[in-house]
Amino acid sequence: MSNTHREQSDVMMLESPFHSRVKAANELNEWDCWAGYTTPTKYFDVELEYFAVRSTTGVFDLSPMNKYSITGPDAQAYLDRVMTRNISKINVDRVGYSVWCDDAGQVMDDGTIFRLAENEYRLCAYARAMDWLSWCAMGFDVNIEDVSDQVAALAVQGPTSCSCLKAMGLEGIENLKPFGIAHFDFDGEDLMVSRTGFTGDLGYELWITPHKAEAMWDALFSAGESYMIKPIGSLALELTRIETGFLQAGVDFVPAQDAVRLGRSRSPFELGLGWLVDMNKPVFNGKQALLREQREGSRYRFVILDVDGNKPAHNSFIYQGKGKVGTVTSAAWCPTAKSNVAFAQIEMPYGEVGDDLVAEIYYERELHWTRVMAPCKVIESAVFNPPRRRQTPAPAY
């Protein structure tokens, strides 16, 4: 490789503040791109990484997540204008989950909103949104800043996660409630810990200035050694989020700003996220379109399917009788729940809880493709939802 090409690669491939530790732990040297950052798909074995989350503690590098600081006298009013949920219900040192829509009531993205102070919020999102957030700020006394590279973050998830953090010296962490925020001193810097995560298990997210990232990684893994702490990649995280019923932007729905063909984006109601829409607010982006949808009905229904057999229904068509009524967006055999789970978008009025459907599954073994028409049933909720996820004080394992 020439020096010119090497310099271009250095510029194009971003590294998280934890990269030196992540690289050293990545035994398989398998990587992917997330928001321009190099990120591991797996470290040593996907199933063992998954079981670290479900049996001990798994650690995922969250740093590439898009993070936006929203401050100023109109911060709350501004967020209430762009978000579907009532932002005033998120108190200081609390986190809220929300979606935001375009004027047609189509979901642009979902994410978490951290209320750090009276007029200070941090929005964490999958898709880049700086331009849109800035356009929506017209008329509001608010400052919006992309702080993605100013905050290093780790997701610490699993039954022994609280024990690991206590061993790290975070006294009282067991009393932090779900979606709560606490602050600790770490080597002279503020370490913010939120009881949040994308695994549906007991877990936390750690947020710190990048120059303390490596020291925090070392302290965490040293404290967690007795609790069998392990790093996990994106493939293991994918398994956990499907098992617990979490949607992924760009996988289970097309962000409205990225949709090329009409009809490919979805509304909150069509994604099973209607509970995040507060129609009592006077005005917010997409409200009129969503009111119209409530009157006239939705086009699609998001469902969770329990699929017969153990072959995941990746990208399958869904049938009722002889007619195709939907498509699968995510699928996985979920080891802890011992269930073959699929998320699907089903055309209305099909897909009510209890409905019997059929998934057309194709799978390949030794260059031979097999077609299976697998019976499946629409179930009411996610297949994994342990009490420890919400238990406070958090249990010690």
Image (cartoon, helix red, strand yellow):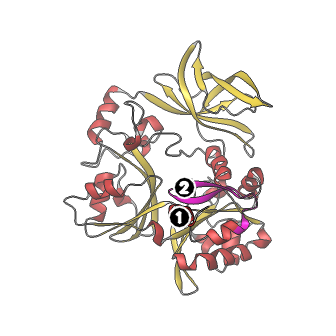
Amino acid identity at mark 2: Trp
Q: Is residue 107 left or right of residue 47?
A: left
Q: Is residue 316 left or right of residue 98?
A: right
Q: Which residue is painted at 42% across and 55% down in the image? A: 128
Q: In the figure, 354 relative to 387: above or below?
A: above
Amino acid identity at mark 1: Thr
Looking at the rendered structure, the secondary structure element under dot 2 is strand
Q: In the figure, 310 relative to 243: above or below?
A: above
Q: Is residue 78 left or right of residue 49?
A: left
Q: Residue furthest front?
A: 2
Q: Which residue is painted at 72% across and 76% down in the image? A: 223
Residue under pointer 1:
4
The quarter of the picture where residue 304 lies is top right
Task: Where is residue 162? Give x, y as percent.
Answer: 67, 68
Task: Where is residue 228? Give x, y as percent.
Answer: 78, 66
Residue under pointer 2:
34
Q: Which residue is painted at 79% across and 72% down in the image? A: 226
Task: Where is residue 40? Give x, y as percent.
Answer: 65, 58
Report if residue 170 is visible in the image.
Answer: no
Which label was assigned to residue 212?
Answer: none
Q: Nearer the viewer, residue 298 or 91?
A: 298
Q: Report the quarter where the C terminus lies.
A: bottom right
Find the magenta span and give its range: 24-42
Q: Earlier in the sequence, mark 2 or mark 1?
A: 1
